[in-house]
Image: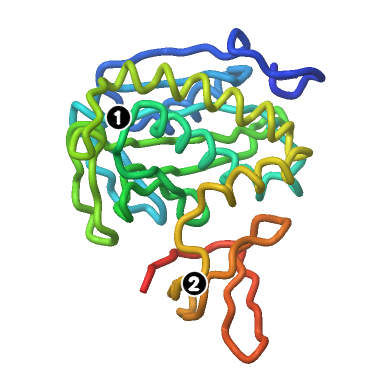
Amino acid sequence: MSGYARTGRLKLEDFRHTALDDAGSTNTECLLRARAGDPGLHWITAARQTEGRGRRGRAWVSERGNLYASLLLIDPAPMERLHSLPLAVAVAVRQAIQSVMPAGANPVTVKWPNDILIAGKKTCGILLEGEGLPDGRHALVIGCGINIAIAPDHGLYPVTSLHAEGASISPDELFAHLFRTMAQALDLWNRGRGIAAIIAEWRAVASGIGEKITVNLPDRSLSGRFAGIDDDGRLMLDLGSGAMQHIAAGDVFFG
């Protein structure tokens, strides 16, 4: 049984960390270790990725100067509770970034489900990947790419970096904050039992509630007003005339 699957509160000392110089992908490194029997609660960081990837298979430029970190979890929650994990991850990453911003800097917010924005510009990519293992366990990896020194333009959203927003921080220093805030958020999430507390924290730092948005789904796009998230963490899209669409996954664009 993994450390995360046991009963009790998560503590910082439950987590391990392996720092690499170059890696193809920190997410891939985590999955390889899971297949080899790693018990989880294991962070893998890299100074550079040569095969970084984002959502939907998009390439993620991963040169030196930014933070590339992935956390391996084994059997983190029953499958029916995993849908709320991206919100917990967003809360953790946003808190880590906010904690290193100078006084007077633009606030750090979240865009559903887990994009991190500063002044409306994306500063972090988060990719969750999972797979069943031959021994019956389930591996889930939380991958985070945070723009610190450089802000590669991936063409979908306006982007920024922490240095551009006034933060003087190194990847190692930011990771120390993320190590702490992720442990706290996962403890609060409590294998999915703490979804209400996570949603409350997410709503408090959400960006764009009440604004017009477009949500790109695999088969179509929907436009309406962002009415927030429901108690299961799904986006609520007000289509007008009393019609409310609840969306479990999609790409959100403001305006």
- Give the colour scheme of this rendering: rainbow
Q: For marks 1 and 2, give the CA distance.
A: 37 Å
Task: Give the numbered dot on residue 217.
Answer: 2
* Residue displayed at 74% across by 46% down: 196
Mark 1 surroundings: few (<14), some (14-19) or many (≥20) residues within 10 A: few
Describe residue 103's horizontal placement relative to residue 30 as left or right.
Answer: left
* Residue displayed at 51% across by 64% down: 209
Amino acid at the residue labelled 1: Pro
Q: Compare residues 249 and 99 and report the one nearer the observer.
A: 99
Of badges 1 and 2, nearer the viewer stands 1
Amino acid at the residue labelled 2: Leu
Describe residue 143's horizontal placement relative to residue 73 as left or right.
Answer: left
Q: Position of residue 59 (x, y in %)?
A: 28, 48
Q: Position of residue 87 (x, y in %)?
A: 58, 46
* Residue displayed at 23% across by 39% down: 165
Image quarter for residue 143? Answer: top left
The residue labelled by disc 1 is: 102
Residue 85 to residue 4: above or below? below
Q: Position of residue 132 (x, y in %)?
A: 64, 38
Quadrant occupied by the C terminus: bottom left
Q: Position of residue 192 (x, y in %)?
A: 74, 40
Residue 187 to residue 18: above or below? below
Mark 2 surroundings: few (<14), some (14-19) or many (≥20) residues within 10 A: some
Q: Report helix, strand or loop for mark 1.
A: loop
Mark 1 vs 2: CB contact within 8 A: no
Image quarter for residue 39? Answer: top right
